[in-house]
Image (spheres, rainbow, N blue to C red):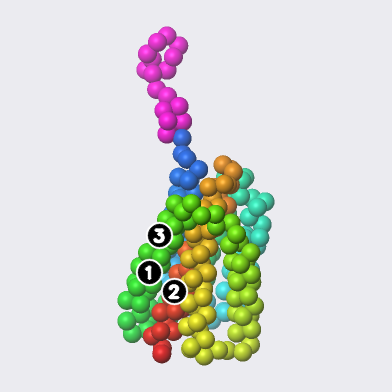
Amino acid sequence: MFGNENQPYYVNAEQAGFKPTFFGKVMFFFAVAIMMSVLAVFIGNEYLLQYFFVTPGLIYVLFIAELALIFTARTWSTKVPLNRFLFALFAFITGLTIAPLISVVAAMPSGVALLSKALIITSMTFTATALIGWTTKMDLSGMRTFLMMTIIGMIIVSVIGIFIPWGNTFEMVFSGIGVLLFSAFTAYDFQKIKRFPEDRYIDAALMLYLDIFNLFIYILRLLLSLRNR
């Protein structure tokens, strides 16, 4: 239809004021990542679980793929539609890697209740720290060095733990530090994305996804260690 001569009556979404904001795009792809991970956990538990237990090396292949996507993210994060495909693929692979853990915990007595508790605590903690990071007037950029040093230290301790297993008390302390660390990362990253360029929405969504994923893992580990006291 036409209003005036040679002028279309309809307008596109951007002209009508529906252009997505940067934050809106970040949260949209963050939600997509969560859904892809949930889908992957379901597929992993329903169809691939036996392969994970029979061929443990498969998990390491997935870990390597995850790391490759993370470390190359800066090269593909602004290339549409490649960035959207690889981001969704990363979230899907990440979901597959935790499918065996979810399966083992769910099979425990009251395991489903424990997983539900971990999900609720993760959601509440992530939301609270996100609001702090988004609304605080305090500059959190000074936390960067401390956060990076802490995460490097935790990676080193995790590697040592492969060769020298630790007890339940140490697991409780280590998991608690992990919860605090990624709670702080969530606040820091939510403030940080305010300064991101418009074309880096995938980078921002990836940061937030890694925050909530690691937060969930450490909260689950903490609950498991508390249960085993």
Say which of 95 and 185 sits in front. 185
How many other residues sit within 10 Å of disc 1, few (<14), some (14-19) or many (≥20)? some
* Location of residue 108 by image quarter: bottom left
Q: Is residue 43 visible?
A: no
Q: Is residue 44 left or right of residue 121?
A: right
Which region shows up in magenta?
1-18
Between 39 and 216, the one lying in front of the other is 216
Residue 57 quadrant? bottom right
Looking at numbered disc 2 in the image, what kind of residue is underneath it? Ile
Residue at figure coordinates x 42%, y 56% from the top left: 131
* Residue 88 against residue 164 in the figure, above or below: above
Q: Nearer the viewer, residue 180 or 138?
A: 138
Give whichever of discs 3 and 1 has the lower sequence position: 1
Please name the residue that numbered disc 2 is placed on.
Answer: 219
Q: Which residue is mark 3?
A: 127
- Pointer 1 residue: 121
